[in-house]
């Protein structure tokens, strides 16, 4: 099937031979074909769906205005003037004689000449420039390309790609943190035809969007869109490439944007780059390039050494304006504003070393440390019967099928909680029995337990104290109770007891209710740990039991909904959070279950304290401080 893109929509050429041509024609609401006639061609059009106004010259030379709808049809004989205007989105089925280039245009909104328009017969492309470091995002892009910053569960670049018509080629420039960007797109958008163009000098003096775009010139010898990676269009559809145009939006701050001045016909007559004396319309970073040969000629002349794409518009290259609603994600403030708008009351538990996405029925994780990703994939082999199927595995990215259901936090059902406890017992003990039956060399899990419990705790604590110096040495009044300094509680831990593990290959490592999906019949586990100490095979069942216990004190689902806060009122820390009644009720049941099954409840409580302490440096303020104070409160109450 050949696709011909038109200013008003598109044509799908289903058959073209020496006898006839068969097309399916899509016209967008409000679009209208040129007012035209054919010297030889004869065609019959059947309306599959929608409503149209058809201008059709009759045998007496009079133009009849026909209101037609689904299942109506009309025939256009040669030399008869005609035009189709879409009252709604319409789909036509056209069968004609084979003279496809036989078109005489009397009037055309896009000022196209007669006959076949070669640009229309070239598959358009959409070029996204995402090679830069994103320095205006400050700490947010220290470890990741700004194209991968999450908004409402999707990377910024996915919001852009989802607007691109499915039949278009996509060109993405890469540079800074290129591997993760490519892997994400391969995992999420593998059905799209994406070509990557790597830009080595993405941070040099001559770098910039224009310089990056020039690297793609050989792939863009056709009409194409140009988009920066921080431009998110609010509209469902991007404008068609019916001419050379730039996307503009009203602004009152011309000093931070390139701005344009327009005449009454929406032609750009002046253009300035980031000037307080600029104009009322900001360039949003999206352009339609129809006359691509003229564009490339101008860019080559004007780009100079600045790398600025907008230098094209400070020339005799004429463009029209498309006024568009957009979100700007190009600065740290504007990015947070967009997240607040698009995510509403959704609070993401952001971590500095990993990123989470839920796109196209897939769950995607990006890790800054590729050892974590590699080991997660290794661990998946031991958990394969209990986790969703992996669909992608790369150096820094893996993805798995989204298991339809709800987390146990979302379900919040005491009886389902108890059912999961029985399932969990089988999950752990089945592997213990298998191990005991196998001839496995002696494995020193205590060494890994020391690394995992003791060494990791102090490593994480030091990381936390770099941000909040001396917080471990202070006594705190938390919820009207006085607690000693953190080091007091750490010194009292018997680390040798914690090293007495229950090893299992089906160790999960983050077994709390936000990582358990239930569909009414089966449970699936997600977001497993990559290792226990240095081991990717074994882990400690006690850690799973403690993670579950800790998750009964705080629902991470509630945290994502921003249902927590803490205040420091005259030296008294107030932790404002209350779990559901079902969680509190089940916690008491779980404590009895632990004792009845021969596990050490005090050991689990100590591990729970360490879990919250270890979590605190992984999160941003204020949740990091909330976790720190909550950990102190847990260990203090346990001691009492």
Image (cartoon, rainbow, N blue to C red):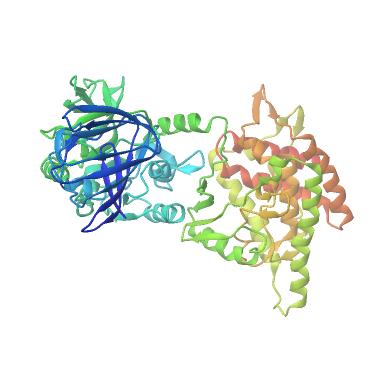
Q: Residue furthest front?
A: 60
Residue 80: x, y in percent? 17, 36
Residue sitting nearer the eye, 103 or 356:
103
Q: Residue at x 30, y 48 (%)?
A: 23
Viewed as shown, does residue 102 lie left or right of 456?
left
Residue 120, x across and y down, in percent: 22, 45
Q: Check the image and report above or below for 505 versus 182.
A: below
Tell me how many marks there are.
Answer: 0
Above or below, 329 relative to 427: above
Visible residue check, residue 492: no
Can residue 295 be seen?
A: yes
Quarter of the image with the C terminus in it: top right
Compared to residue 292, the image places residue 59 above or below, namely above
- Point out residue 163 in the picture as x, y percentages from the top left corner: 38, 41
Q: Please name the residue shown 78% across and 64% down the image.
A: 429
Nearest the viewer among 192 and 346 is 192
Q: Left of 127 or right of it: where is 78?
A: left
Foreground residue, 551 or 227? 227
Please give left or right for residue 469 compared with residue 98 in the image: right
Counting from the top left corner in percent of width and height, residue 20 is at: 24, 54
Res. 240 image quadrant? top left
- Residue farthest toward the right in the current orientation of the protein: 596
Identify which residue, 384 or 531, lies in the foreground: 384
Q: Quadrant of the N terminus?
A: bottom left
């Amino acid at each position: 099937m050949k696709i011909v893109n038109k200013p008003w929509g598109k044509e799908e050429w289903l058959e073209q031979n020496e006898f006839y041509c068969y097309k399916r024609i899509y016209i967008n609401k409000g679009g209208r074909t040129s007012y035209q006639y054919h010297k030889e061609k004869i065609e019959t059009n059947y309306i599959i769906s929608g409503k149209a106004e058809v201008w059709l010259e009759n045998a007496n030379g009079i133009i009849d205005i026909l209101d037609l709808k689904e299942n109506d049809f009309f025939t256009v004989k040669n030399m008869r003037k005609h035009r189709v205007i879409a009252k709604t989105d319409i789909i036509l089925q056209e069968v004609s004689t084979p003279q496809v280039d036989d078109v005489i245009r009397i009037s055309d909104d896009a000022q196209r000449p007669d006959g076949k328009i070669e640009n229309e017969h070239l598959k358009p492309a959409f070029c996204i420039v995402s090679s830069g470091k994103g320095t205006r995002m400050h700490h947010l892009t220290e470890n990741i390309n700004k194209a991968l910053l999450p908004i409402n569960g999707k990377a910024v670049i996915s919001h852009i790609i989802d607007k691109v018509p499915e039949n278009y080629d996509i060109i993405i420039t890469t540079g800074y943190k290129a591997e993760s960007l490519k892997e994400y797109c391969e995992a999420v958008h593998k059905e799209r035809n994406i070509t990557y163009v790597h830009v080595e000098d993405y941070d040099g003096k001559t770098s910039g969007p224009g310089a990056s775009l020039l690297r793609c010139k050989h792939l863009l010898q056709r009409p194409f869109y140009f988009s920066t990676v921080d431009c998110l269009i609010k509209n469902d559809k991007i404008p068609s490439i019916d001419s050379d145009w730039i996307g503009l939006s009203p602004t009152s701050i011309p000093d931070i944007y390139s701005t344009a001045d327009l005449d009454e016909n929406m032609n750009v007559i002046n253009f300035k780059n980031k000037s307080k004396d600029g104009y009322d319309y900001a360039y949003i970073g999206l352009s339609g390039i129809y006359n691509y040969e003229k564009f490339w000629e101008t860019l080559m002349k004007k780009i100079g050494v600045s790398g600025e794409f907008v230098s094209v518009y400070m020339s005799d290259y004429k463009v029209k304006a498309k006024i568009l609603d957009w979100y700007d994600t190009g600065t740290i403030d504007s990015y947070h504003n967009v997240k607040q708008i698009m995510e509403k009351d959704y609070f993401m538990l952001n971590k500095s070393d990993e990123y989470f996405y839920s796109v196209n029925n897939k769950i995607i994780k990006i890790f800054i440390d590729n050892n974590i990703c590699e080991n997660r994939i290794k661990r998946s082999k031991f958990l394969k019967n209990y986790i969703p199927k992996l669909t992608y595995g790369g150096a820094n990215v893996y993805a798995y099928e989204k298991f339809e259901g709800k987390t146990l936090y979302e379900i919040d059902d005491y009886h389902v909680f108890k059912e999961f406890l029985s399932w969990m017992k089988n999950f752990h003990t089945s592997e213990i029995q298998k191990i005991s039956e196998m001839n496995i060399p002696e494995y020193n899990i205590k060494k890994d337990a020391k690394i995992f419990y003791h060494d990791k705790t102090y490593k994480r604590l030091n990381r936390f104290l770099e941000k909040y110096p001396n917080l471990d040495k202070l006594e705190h009044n938390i919820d009207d109770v006085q607690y000693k300094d953190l080091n007091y509680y750490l010194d009292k831990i018997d680390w040798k007891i914690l090293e007495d593990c229950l090893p299992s290959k089906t160790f999960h490592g983050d077994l709390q209710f936000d990582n358990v999906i239930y569909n009414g019949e089966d449970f699936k586990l997600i977001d497993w740990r990559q290792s226990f100490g240095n081991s990717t095979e074994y882990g400690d069942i006690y850690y799973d039991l403690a993670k579950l216990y800790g998750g009964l004190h705080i629902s991470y689902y509630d945290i994502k909904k921003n249902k927590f806060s803490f205040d420091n009122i005259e030296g008294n820390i107030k932790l404002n959070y209350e779990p559901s009644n079902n969680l509190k009720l089940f916690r008491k049941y779980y404590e009895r279950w632990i004792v009845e099954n021969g596990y050490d409840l005090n050991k689990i409580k100590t591990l729970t304290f360490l879990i919250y302490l270890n979590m605190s440096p992984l999160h941003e303020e204020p949740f990091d401080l909330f976790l720190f104070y909550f950990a102190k409160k847990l260990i203090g109450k346990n001691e009492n």
